Image: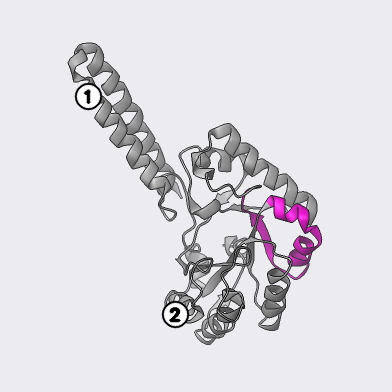
Amino acid sequence: MRNAHWRRRLLLGASAVLHLLAFGAILFQAALWPWALAGVLLNHLLIAALGLWPRSHWLGPNWTRLPAAAAARHEIALTIDDGPDPVVTPLVLDLLERYAVRATFFVIGEKALRYPALCRDIVRRGHAVENHSQQHRHYFSLLGPRAMARELQAAQDTLTTITGQRPLFFRAPAGLCNPFLDPILTRLGLRLATWSVRAFDTRVKDAARVQSQLLGGLHAGAILLLHDGHAARTKQGTPVLLEVLPAVLTSATGAGLRFVTLRQALSP
């Protein structure tokens, strides 16, 4: 975590110095403005590219896997995004209960307001509800600091009020972010979490392909990503995650791995 903060400070510090040098170069010799502008643009492109890299640690601490202590305990995390969904989520909860598995649900605030009882049921069954923003805007990474803070705070308030459980983790929509996010997370007491392995189950309708991708990423400390909201359907109309979860859960258990929520993995 310290290294992630150091990387962010180094990146933003270097960016600030570059801007000052570019401004100074133009003041010294106006004819240098094309080079100064090119340097500044390249700098912004680099920062934008890092924001488009969900598993990057350059813009702040980021859980791309569980802490070393959790991995040493052979723990693994299943995270489920974009819900709650009134049709899919109850089926997922029943399946998880059948396998005695605990999962982390990254919930959208506006959906939680539509289905509060479902959110409470997630917590009642021993799972964790975490912050996935209030509106799940596709342009979340383009928001300024005030708008971004409002999104996170609104979801914090919504989910805490509904479930009685204050979120400890945040996952950005599509995993995309910008340099404003880390200070906001720090202020709200949230940790950024992405994933170790995903299988694009909102787009890929081939359950065998999704399952193969997830099984290839089963190891101690892994964070798996699936979706109950916006879930792709197989040709038979079954949500893909419902097709693949039994094999994933069985294989993980057979490999001696124990599913925990992200907040459980915080234990030293």
Residue 180 percent coordinates (x, y): 50, 37
> Amino acid under label 2?
Ser
Question: Quick one: SS at disc 2?
Answer: helix
* Alpha-carbon span between mark 2 and mark 1: 49 Å
Magenta region, residue range: 109-133
Residue 92 percent coordinates (x, y): 67, 74
- The mark lying in front, picked from 2 and 1, is 1
Magenta portion: prevailing SS class: helix
| Residue at x-position 29% and y-position 28% | 18
| In magenta segment, residue 44 | no
**Could you classify mark 2 by the number of other residues whose Cα lies within 10 Å: few (under 14), some (14-19), or many (20 or more)?**
some
| Residue at x-position 54% and y-position 44% | 140
Residue situated in front as seen by the camera: 205 or 195: 205
The numbered mark at residue 34 is 1
Res 192 visible: no
> Amino acid under label 1?
Pro
| In magenta segment, residue 126 | yes
Residue to which mark 2 is pinned = 212
Question: Quick one: SS at disc 1?
Answer: helix
Res 251 visible: yes
Image quarter for residue 212?
bottom left
Relative vertical location of residue 79 with respect to residue 131 in this rendering, above or below: below
The numbered mark at residue 99 is none
Residue 199 percent coordinates (x, y): 47, 70
Residue situated in front as seen by the camera: 73 or 107: 107
How many marks overall? 2
**Could you classify mark 1 by the number of other residues whose Cα lies within 10 Å: few (under 14), some (14-19), or many (20 or more)?**
few
Quarter of the image that includes the C terminus: bottom right
Answer left or right for 74 relative to 110: left
Residue 139 percent coordinates (x, y): 52, 44
